[in-house]
Image (cartoon, grey):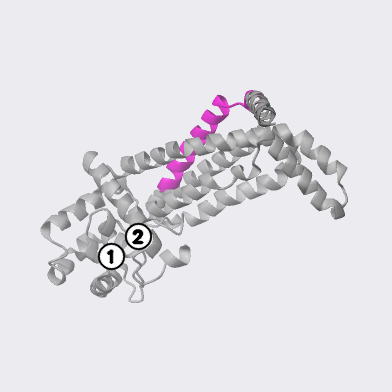
Amino acid sequence: MNSILLASNVVSTGIAVFKPLYWLFGKCMGLLMEALGNQYFIAIIIFTVVTRLLLLPLNVRQQKTMARTTRLQPKIQKIQKKYPDPKDRAQLNQEMQELYAREGHNPMQMGCGPMAFQMVFLMGIIGIIYYPLGYVLGISAVNDGTTAKSIMDVILPIYQGLTGDPEAKITYFQLNILENFSAYKDALVANFSDIFTAERCDAIMAYRDGMNLFGLDMTAIPHWKDGIIVIIPIICLITSLGSSLISTLIQKKNNPAASQQMGSMMMMMLMMPFFSFYISFRFPAAVGFYWIISNVVAILQQIFIFKQYPPRKTQARLMIENTIERRSREENIKKIQ
């Protein structure tokens, strides 16, 4: 992803397969911002909360599947002890499948559904954050590679003048226009009057103002030299660690038998927060802000699910449901016979 979105002086208009998603999310974001009086960050928060709510049924289902797996753990271990020899692997797998069939359990249901949905959503968020002119403000011409390259040729010398570096490169083309629009405006209007009309220029300036949070320019890429904006990656790291820690503790509660593996799991879970911390310094601060909100909502959601579906009660409920279902199947078989 980094190589796709961080191509210096190469105008990226996004990944083709996700462009319909960019368009959809851009339309939703535009309507939200219009309704909220250009409150960019409130709109992002609403997007994140709605997504997490959509994920809630999948997460609840995953919690129930984990509880069912925990309940079956003694039986699984008994079968594994019965066939310790690798040569008996086929027999072991057969008995495991029979156990799952009797219990009506599918371990594959734990899968990656919620994570896959989050990744798809993240790609839509990328469309909003990285390509706001084309997909949120509806200036579709900047999504055309040829037109975008022509615009790049006009603004690059101005940008190099602003930085004082004749070799300076532009990353995040549309965000760069937002960040430096005051400096680019006259040249863009003079060269592309049909694209940068007075109405669109006003819309760009309003959107630009909306991406300023408590004096922090969220179109900028955080850097330790830039002062207070580094608070975004730091909070991102803290909330990511919090989410991973709570997830680990809940898994330990759900499946005490897996506590021996918690050391290696913890290492894996710690990798992602520090990876997000690193990435937060590579992308505009708006991405870090999205991750912060997503982490906070994830923490609240995990606590809610754990409180509403505690492991022991969930396992007891599943045991009753499985008993009723098994007896129903047996009755049906008797009727057929």
Q: In the rendered view, does 337 fall on the left or right side of 196?
A: right
Instruction: Determine the image quadrant of residue 201.
Output: bottom left
| Mark 1 or 2, nearer chain start | 2
Check disc 2 and report the residue beneath it.
19
User: Residue 72 appears at what percent x and percent y?
Assistant: 73, 34
Q: In the rendered view, does 99 fall on the left or right side of 132?
A: right
Dominant secondary structure of the residues highlighted in magenta in the image: helix
Q: In the rendered view, does 295 fall on the left or right side of 216?
A: right
Instruction: Determine the image quadrant of residue 258.
Output: top right
Secondary structure under badge 1? helix
Q: Is residue 15 visible?
A: no
User: Residue 47 appears at what percent x and percent y?
Assistant: 36, 42
**Residue 298 is a magenta residue:** yes
Q: Is residue 247 visible?
A: yes
**Residue 292 is a magenta residue:** yes
Please report the bounds of the magenta region as a residue range: 289-315
Secondary structure under badge 2? helix
> Mark 2, residues whose alpha carbon is within 10 Å: few (<14), some, or many (≥20)?
some
Q: Which mark is residue 143?
A: 1
**Vertical side of 311 occupied by 274: above or below:** below
- Tell me the quadrant of the picture where the C terminus can be found: top right
How far apart are labels 1 and 2 at the CA level? Answer: 10 Å
User: Residue 318 appears at what percent x and percent y?
Assistant: 64, 27
Instruction: Determine the image quadrant of residue 53.
Output: top left
**Three-letter amino acid code of the residue under disc 1:** Asn
User: Residue 299 appears at what percent x and percent y?
Assistant: 51, 36
The answer to which of 206 and 17 lies nearer the viewer is 17
> Mark 1, residues whose alpha carbon is within 10 Å: few (<14), some, or many (≥20)?
many
Q: Pointers 1 and 2 in contact (CB under 8 A)?
A: yes
Residue for point 41% across, 70% down: 7
**Vertical side of 336 occupied by 111: above or below:** below
